[in-house]
Image: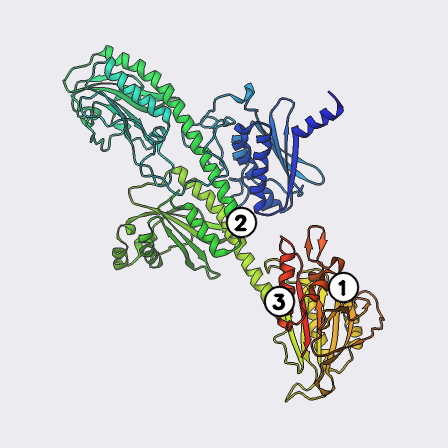
Amino acid sequence: MTARAKDEQLKRQAVSATFPSAATSVADARRFVRRVLAEWGMEEAADDAVLATSELATNAVTYAGTSFEVACRLTDEGDIQVEVRDLHPTRAIAMPGMNASSGRGLPSIARLAASWGVTYDRRAKGVWFRLPNPGSSNGTAPPRVSSEDPGLINGGPVTAEAAPGRPRAGDRARPGADERAPASRSPRAAGRTGQPGRHGDGAARVHDEPEVASGLPAGGDRMLRSPAARDSLESAVTTVRDVLDADAAAVLLTERDGRLVLGAATGLPGDVPLGELSVVNLGPDARAGEPWVSSDASDPIAAALRARSLAAAPLEAQGRLTGVVVALSSAPGRFEETAAARLGRIADEMSLSLEKARVGELERSWRGWLSFVAEASDLLAGTLDQERTMALVAQLVVPRLSTWCAVYTTAETGAARLAYVWHADETRADGLRELLEHADPGPSMDSPGPWHGLAGAPQDVRAAAGPTAADQAFAFPLIARGRRIGTIVIGRPPGDRFPRSAIELAEELSRRAALAVDNARLYSEQTAMSSALQRSLLPPAIPEIPGLEVAVVYEPAGEGSEVGGDFYDVFETTGASGPASAASRWRFAIGDVCGTGPEAAAVTGLARHALRILAAENLSVPDVLGRLNRLILAEGERGRLLTLLHGEIAPRSRRDGVSIRLTSAGHPPPLILNPDGKVTEAASPQPLLGVFDGVDFRTETVQLRRGQVLLCVTDGVTERRSGARLLGDGHGLERLLAGCTGLSAGAVAARIQRAVRDFGPEPSGDDVALIVLRAS
């Protein structure tokens, strides 16, 4: 193999990409991993890799707070290794269960991956996991799943007896891990086969059990979701009926609470109710795992299935009673012990196939909910609006985990406020809100538990709410950064219990929701504070200047979370009271402080207020700039560089325009537009402020006659970027201004503003400020 061929092979076996520390990067990382595995022809392993990458990428964004790299490579053994590296090498990996308010994903990684680990160096920290190549022999081992629902998200300790094994690479929970889980499910499992049977016919049927609202089925119902289990049940009851020459046959499946439900039957009436038939009602043979016969019509199973005699054998898996297969007769004494022995052998074969189907369905359910939590985390991290975040939390919970959901926030006084209500049945939403507003929230909860607030509502409100008033509810405190910020309450009808897995999932979701809500709250507070500070740094109003049209534009960069460094001002220095006179003067200024944030805002405030104060003392424009330069230098390390264009406006005789004396201290030069479309610069550059002491500034005089326009901008205009180009390159701003001939000051400002916005596909990364003066 040539050196070039080896290099190409190495490139195919190792691919990486770097992503910024942003919520949207998690989805980008998922798409990157899926694309790489598709190019390698390993789509079967993509779901496992995408889920694990999603958790680790979210960890990097949420806790490390740095950009992160995702690297995919093929090992010498042909396995797939994915590593997520961030730039916070000293940050420990938090584990759910150890620290309930932070940490995520690592128990999930342990279930998904063949192996995983953490690497550190001086610059970075990486978490890697390895998946077997789905095409190799080490990728085909069948999964081992515990007899209970997997502890999906809670991250608690897993015992050796019940620890689920690693899922097989390539098993899929649904068409794609990046697709949204369905918002709701049918009351009965879709796609179940089997024809309805009548008493005496030969058709086997699979009995549908109502699903719980969460979509997390109980043990027997989970098995009925599997096509393989349904086929096995149909075949089994037909075989039992034929082999034992029985009038009917049935399979009863065990729920987690010990109830027996009808899984499949042939020869039974279609309306057989089992009532409260439970494992505890069975005799010693069933509990000992032995087949038995009964000629007593009072036998619990015989009575429930309306038979006078039966032969039965338990279905077992890993020492657990998972169900019972029975042959039934309407005649007493129909079966002998030999029939029970034959039925026991059939039950042994059935147990193996049903357990395999049950394990597969557990695996698919576990994967689906893991995908749901990963996607929910992305959605919660993708919004910084507090109200929207709370609405999203409620809509994620309903109807997957509950029939309704309410989100309470906690005030500084500790009082609970109902912030959002969502019900699966929109017609009940108003009644539920009224009920919750009058409910007794009770004491604040530090851990999840049953919630009895509905019982404290007045009787008339409960009556107006109808059946909802009797719903059972469960509450989950929202605790972020050691502080209780609210509560999530979920509810279901009284007969629809909360499965353990639904509670664990809701608890994990509440932890992630608490951080999302608190981040949104902090962001809202910061944005409001920044907006108030920004308003205080801008002039309250623009004065009327005789013979001059004035238009201004100011756009801070980003979403308002940072205070910008650009500012402008136009103000009168004399003749502030009464009508304007020939002695009236006006000053204008436009400046740009280096950087953003509070430090830049401090210099912005210093500059704008100092300009007005010094002008009121009748200092000339050069003297004002010299004094301001000394003030900034006196700030020491807190000072920031400042570019400033400052000028004084005075009326010309016979009202023929205005005279402007101005100084450009390191600022982009102002431009003059003549009525004939010619554009010229109006001032030469001088040193910017905050660098040198003892600078002697000078002014230049501009006579702005009728129809002429003076344009002053910050570098947010001239340095607006589109790829490698800047708006100011090649006299771009001059050409843009030349196209504004004949326009008013406001129209010129609007056209420049629109051109800046449209110049590049991405939002501007710098503040934009401009002043347009047009002599009229």
Label 3 and label 2: CA atoms lie apart by 32 Å
Residue type for callout 2? Gly
Label 3 neighbour load within 10 Å: few <14, some 14-19, many 20+: some
> Which corner quadrant of the image does residue 254 belong to?
top left
Any part of residue 153 in sight: no
Q: Residue at x 19, y 27 (%)?
A: 269
Q: Nearer the viewer, mark 3 or mark 2?
A: 3
Residue with the most extreme front position: 676
Mark 1 or 2, nearer chain start: 2
* Quadrant the C terminus occupies: bottom right
Mark 1, other Cα within 10 Å: few <14 / some 14–19 / many ≥20: some
Q: Which residue is mark 1?
A: 641
Mark 1 and mark 3: span between their CA atoms?
29 Å
Residue indicated by mark 3: 750
Side of 40 relative to 233 (left or right) = right
Sequence order check, earlier mark of 3 and 2: 2
Task: State the mark number for residue 382.
Answer: 2
What is the three-letter code of the residue carrying label 1? Leu
Contact? badges 1 and 3 (CB < 8 Å): no
* 344 or 660: nearer the viewer: 660
As drawn, is 112 to the left or to the right of 577?
A: left
Q: Quadrant of the N terminus?
A: top right
